[in-house]
Amino acid sequence: MMYDVVIIGAGQAGLAMGFYLKKTNQSFLLLDKAKEIGETWRNRYDSLTLFTPRAYSELPNLELKGPRQGYPTKDEVADYLAQFASHHSIPIQMNTTVTKVTKEEKEFKIETTVETIQAKNVVIATGPFQEAFIPSFAKNLPNHIRQVHSSQYKNPTQLKDGPVLVVGGGNSGAQIAVELAEDRRVYLSVGQKLTFIPQDIGGKSIFWWFEKLGILKASTTSKLGTFIKSRPDPIFGFELKKAIQSGKVTIKPRTTNIKEDTFCFEDKSEVKVPNIVWATGFISNYPWLQIPNVFHQNGRPQHTRGVTNIKGLYFLGLPWQYRRGSALLQGIADDAKYIVQHIEDTKQQ
Ligand SMILES: Cc1cc2nc3c(=O)[nH]c(=O)nc-3n(C[C@H](O)[C@H](O)[C@H](O)COP(=O)(O)OP(=O)(O)OC[C@H]3O[C@@H](n4cnc5c(N)ncnc54)[C@H](O)[C@@H]3O)c2cc1C
């Protein structure tokens, strides 16, 4: 079967593509390896509540039901994405893992666990968080220490009794540290100074202020965008700050090594804990994309606003693809619209 466009991944990025492609005459199909839409969100930790309020967690033309300034749970978002797909009748084939993509002359050959498909354009929307990154010294961990990456972490019952070291001070590390601090000693190892930002100011969500100040729309090349990009992401809300002040969470600098069951930090201090949660982020990996000259040496895609230098090949949903909001629910639509327009313009050439 030959399509004008095949989209790999039916998360928010793929669905936003589907929404705009439906307004064109292009034939298209979304492929996803998951059993059901929203699986990425459903698999995240049980207590995850979004840091973006409902009003800033929506795709085009479908409301996420509930108080506009309230924060949705991860399962609410999973349900919303499934509802979005059916509401807009987006053609999706689930249970289909893409195993190899090549380009032969003008067309792409997409090999999957189900069948081989041909397309004139391919959009890679497989998510910014693909493979768990764990520092290499973790290989020295003795077996009796329970270790879990934030992407596998569900709730405190996965850990042994006793204290825990959470490594990584992003929003996931912060939320997990606060949850674990309810009934155990928590050390949080961070590579840089934590900055906290309120979720609401003057009765308005911080995202309302971000919008007013142009922060969400600041592009990668703008002065404001360059400034924001150079700074670490702030922690939304003050729960972690309170837990640090009350002594429930102890901040440690960067973890540098492990000796037996002792964790060593940059300031030469050490702790012994039976549990570790790696909130150390993710790396992108596209082993199935077998087209030369797509990636920089660091493994990141070479692109401008998601358009690669391979005709017909696009990425969508990359962090800072074009703006701060590019990998967020609310920001994906603009980037998707741009790529659909690019595909339309190229068709006419
Ligand atoms: C802990 C956490 C909290 C977050 N909180 C917020 C928040 O509050 N607000 C917000 O706006 N954003 C938040 N985000 C960021 C962002 O919205 C999500 O990461 C979002 O899931 C990215 O959507 P996506 O469609 O780009 O990728 P994904 O949701 O990861 O979807 C990619 C899809 O591609 C499929 N796939 C991958 N490889 C293949 C393959 N080879 N073949 C077929 N299918 C494949 C997967 O099954 C998946 O369904 C958060 C992220 C994390 C990790």
Image (cartoon, grey):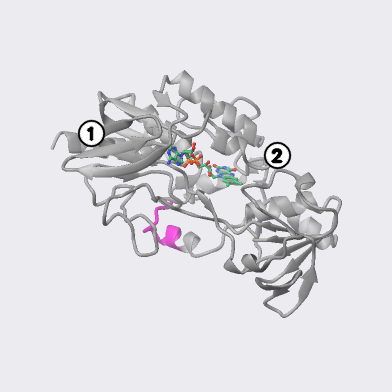
Residue at image point 59% right, 32% down:
77
Secondary structure beneath dot 1 equals: helix
Which mark is first along the chain, 2 or 1? Answer: 2
Choose top left, top right, bottom left or bottom right for residue 280: bottom right
Query: Residue 328 versus residue 139: which sits nearer the camera?
Result: 139
Q: In the picture shown, does residue 93 fall above or below 345?
A: above
Farthest-out residue, front: 143
Residue at image point 49% right, 65% down:
230
- Numbered mark located on residue 46 in the image: 2
Mark 2: is the Cβ under 8 angstroms from ligand 1?
no
The kind of residue tagged 1 is Glu
From the top left corner, tell me how far across and down residue 127 is, in percent.
47, 44
- Numbered mark located on residue 192 in the image: none
Q: In the picture shown, does residue 113 fall above or below 290?
A: above
Q: Are marks 1 and 2 in contact (CB under 8 Å)?
A: no
Specify few, some or many for label 2: CA neighbours under 10 Å numbering under 14, 14-19, or 20 or more.
some
- Numbered mark located on residue 344 in the image: 1
The kind of residue tagged 2 is Asp
3D distance between C-alphas at marks 1 and 2 = 41 Å
Residue at image point 31% right, 43% down:
101
- Residue 299 is left or right of residue 69, and the answer is left
Query: Residue 99 versus residue 323: which sits nearer the camera?
Result: 99
User: Residue 200 magenta-drawn?
Assistant: no
Residue at image point 66% right, 64% down:
194
Q: Which residues are magenta?
A: 218-226
- For the C terminus, the quadrant is top left
